[in-house]
Image (tube, grey):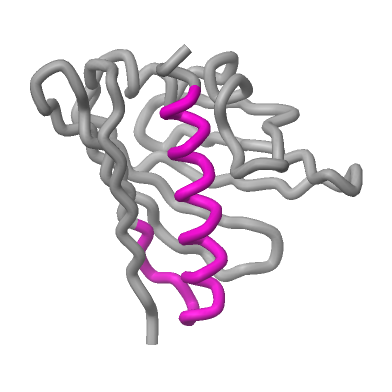
Amino acid sequence: MSVVLVVRRTIRADAETLFRAWTEPEQLRAWWGPRPVVCVGASVDLRVGGRYRIENGLPSGGVVVLEGEFLAIDAPRALSYTWRMGDDPESIVRVRFEPRGAETEVIVTHEQIADERVRDSHAAGWSGCLDGLERHFSR
């Protein structure tokens, strides 16, 4: 059995700006991570088959690595990629950037999650990341 998670947030920025924030390492480092986690490293090879790596710095000093491969890129509207965090089974993340006037709705669909426990953990993580993205563009 696999579980699907959908998290949405409307942010005051255009789709192109948000797409770049999601895919450029220097911008990822500025906003990624549910507090108190911070992004301590990011690399992105933005092409189908290219890989990404995000290093989440934990308050304890530890680091959790998220990594995967881009499956589809439709800039600035959407992207999808594999997702692996630690020893969890690989899953799929799809992100859509849908214009809503002066704002954009960011829709994260995380598919093929192993179970409800992992889904709930990811729900908190994605909500926290979208909080950070929203804060980044409200300054």
Q: Position of residue 82 (x, y in %)?
A: 44, 52
Question: Height in image: 121 above or below 117?
Answer: above
Magenta stretch holds residue 121: yes
Which image quarter: residue 80?
Answer: top left
Residue furthest out toward the front: 139
Q: Viewed as shown, does residue 6 lie left or right of 51?
A: left
* Residues shaded magenta: 110-135
Q: Position of residue 49 (x, y in %)?
A: 41, 37
- Residue at the image point whose x is 40% and y is 39% from the top: 70
Which image quarter: residue 110?
Answer: bottom left
Q: How many marks?
A: 0
Q: Viewed as shown, does residue 29 lie left or right of 80?
A: right
Q: Position of residue 44 (x, y in %)?
A: 53, 26
Which image quarter: residue 4?
Answer: bottom left
Secondary structure mainly formed by the magenta segment = helix
Q: Position of residue 100 (x, y in %)?
A: 11, 28
Question: Height in image: 124 above or below 133?
Answer: below
The quarter in which the N terminus is drawn is: bottom left
Name the foreground residue: 110 vs 103: 103
